Image: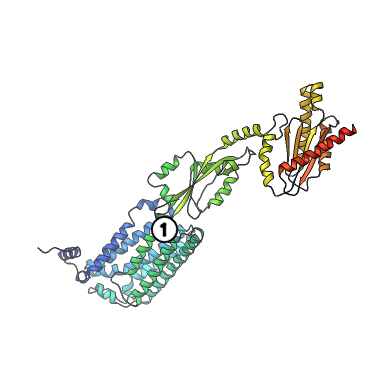
């Protein structure tokens, strides 16, 4: 017995059912192409559940159903011998195609987050109804195909018939709608390419539309193919769109294979951002804590700006401002790259660790470490760290060193409590003066030595500062003044802080010597 090839098997089966001669004159490669086409169309239905995850993909499923119906209709025309079916099945392809184009317009607008108004939907629906009615009544007016139905009509006669005026209207409107789709998608993916250098979407869409236009023009005016090339291009386009959108949708991927379950059980708050910097998913805790609401079409920069109203966000705890803000949440942000296996497409996962309590504790420890417990001024520990900032500063700054008179004598004659009050009185006066200056810092270096640093050359008026200090001292000390010596120096030549202090210290001891000589 002679072995049958894969192509010959369906032909033998068709003969058993007395199918029309057109089936047998189709070349083997046509059946092969049709079989491949069926496989590709069915491939679009491998994960139907994906289309129901988000509303913007729902119409993609409807388009794929239409493609399947279109594909089956083309195949049935070759294997069904009923004349009525042949005529009206061939005609029905026109409203199917027109409906697919309309669905594509609405689907792309959903994908690009463009609202489909009721007027647009109504207009497109009316256009489709007119198209369908015109097609199905073609036998009376022959506006689409110049061939009316009779019992002798065959598929070959239908394909060889001239087209009518309505066919050109159908084709022109379809191409206008497809041009609109191409314009919207190409502009969107061009902007995406400029921002992220992701060329794949723009390349795939451009290839689909250019090849589709070229093949259709050949089909219409040069050579008529056995299988409508528009269907093949449409299937290729939907496959490309699935790769571009659904398969590489980080939000969709996060909800598959229990990924969303894992994310929901993260201890940390998180944000998932795509390659274009748009937020695609966020933890419920983050949404609740910052009242974020709908995150669709919001960029990472926009959402970060919203979060900054309630939080201090940092990636390096060393760079956190030492001044603790009680009304803020402290979030330590960690960034992780998400690499998808297709076309090196990537996004980012941002994890947020709530370190408010940790920062509060650090603030208390820093407060003890950097502050003098008696006077509540900054201490020498703070000053040692502050030196580095001053040495790196390019702006001029001034310093005044103070040395109080008679602290030991006060301690010996009136007790240490009286001496402490003397120190507190001067410290409070120095603190009040620092408040009146811009970028001024009051420090107790130890014992009866104090330091005032003014990082503003305009505000560094030595005589005015001393006058204000004496005024505050009198207000706190029953109108009695307090004796002290001081030395000042303005750093205007990018000197080191060590040299600035030495020069101010020299001025201090010079004043001490002069006062001693006068007494």
Assign the C terminus to one quadrant of the image: top right
What kind of colouring is applied to the model shown? rainbow
Find disc 1 in the rendering and name its residue: 244
- Toward the viewer: 498 or 457? 498
Task: Decide: is 273 above or below 202.
Answer: above
* Left or right: where 380 falls relative to 127: right
Quadrant hosting residue 110 = bottom left
Q: Residues within 10 Å of mark 1 (few under 14, many from 20)?
A: many
Task: Decide: is 284 above or below 216.
Answer: above
Which residue is painted at 56% across and 51% down in the image? 302
Q: Position of residue 303 (x, y in %)?
A: 55, 49
Q: Position of residue 481 (x, y in %)?
A: 85, 32
Q: Residue furthest right?
A: 518
Quadrant hosting residue 25 = bottom left
- Toward the viewer: 267 or 79? 267
Q: Residue furthest left?
A: 1
- Toward the viewer: 76 or 288? 288
Q: Position of residue 352 (x, y in %)?
A: 52, 42
């Amino acid at each position: 017995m002679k072995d049958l090839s894969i192509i010959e098997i369906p032909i033998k089966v068709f003969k058993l059912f007395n199918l029309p001669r057109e089936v047998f004159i189709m070349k083997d490669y046509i059946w092969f192409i049709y079989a491949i086409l069926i496989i590709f169309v069915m491939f679009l239905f491998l994960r139907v559940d994906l289309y129901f995850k988000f509303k913007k993909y729902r119409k993609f499923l409807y388009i794929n159903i239409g493609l399947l119906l279109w594909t089956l209709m083309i195949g049935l025309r070759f294997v069904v011998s009923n004349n009525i079916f042949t005529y009206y099945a061939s005609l029905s392809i026109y409203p199917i195609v027109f409906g697919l184009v309309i669905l594509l317009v609405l689907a792309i607008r959903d994908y690009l987050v463009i609202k489909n108004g009721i007027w647009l939907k109504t207009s497109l629906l009316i256009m489709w109804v007119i198209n369908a009615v015109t097609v199905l009544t073609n036998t009376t007016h022959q506006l689409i195909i110049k061939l009316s139905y009779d019992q002798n009509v065959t598929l070959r006669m239908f394909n060889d018939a001239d087209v009518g005026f309505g066919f050109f209207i159908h084709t022109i409107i379809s191409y206008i709608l497809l041009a609109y789709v191409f314009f919207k998608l190409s502009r969107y993916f061009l902007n995406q390419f400029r921002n992220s250098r992701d060329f794949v979407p723009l390349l795939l869409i451009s290839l689909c539309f250019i090849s589709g236009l070229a093949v259709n023009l050949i089909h219409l005016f040069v050579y008529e193919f056995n299988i409508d090339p528009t269907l093949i291009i449409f299937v290729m386009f939907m496959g490309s769109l699935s790769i571009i959108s659904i398969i590489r949708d980080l939000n969709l991927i996060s909800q598959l294979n229990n990924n969303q379950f894992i994310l929901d059980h993260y201890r940390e708050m998180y944000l998932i951002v795509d390659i274009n910097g748009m937020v695609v998913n966020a933890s419920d805790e983050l949404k609740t804590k910052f009242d974020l609401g709908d995150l669709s079409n919001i960029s990472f920069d926009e959402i970060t700006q919203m979060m900054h109203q309630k939080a201090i966000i940092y990636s390096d705890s060393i760079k956190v401002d030492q001044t603790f803000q009680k009304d803020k949440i402290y979030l330590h942000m960690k960034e992780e790259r998400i690499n998808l296996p297709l076309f090196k497409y990537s996004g980012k996962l941002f994890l947020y660790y709530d370190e408010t309590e940790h920062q509060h504790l650090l603030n208390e420890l820093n407060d003890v470490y950097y502050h003098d417990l008696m006077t509540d001024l900054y201490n020498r520990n703070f000053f040692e760290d502050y030196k580095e900032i001053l040495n790196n500063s390019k702006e001029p700054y001034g310093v005044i060193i103070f040395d109080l008179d008679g602290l030991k004598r006060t301690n010996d004659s009136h007790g240490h409590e009286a001496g402490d009050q003397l120190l507190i009185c001067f410290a409070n006066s120095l603190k009040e003066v620092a408040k009146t200056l811009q970028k001024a810092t009051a420090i107790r270096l130890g014992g009866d030595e104090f330091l005032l640093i003014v990082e503003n050359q305009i505000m560094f008026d030595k005589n005015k500062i001393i006058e204000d200090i004496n005024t505050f001292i009198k207000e706190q000390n029953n109108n009695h003044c307090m004796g002290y010596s001081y030395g000042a120096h303005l750093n205007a030549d990018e000197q080191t802080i060590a040299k600035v202090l030495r020069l101010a210290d020299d001025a201090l001891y010079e004043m001490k010597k002069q006062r001693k000589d006068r007494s």
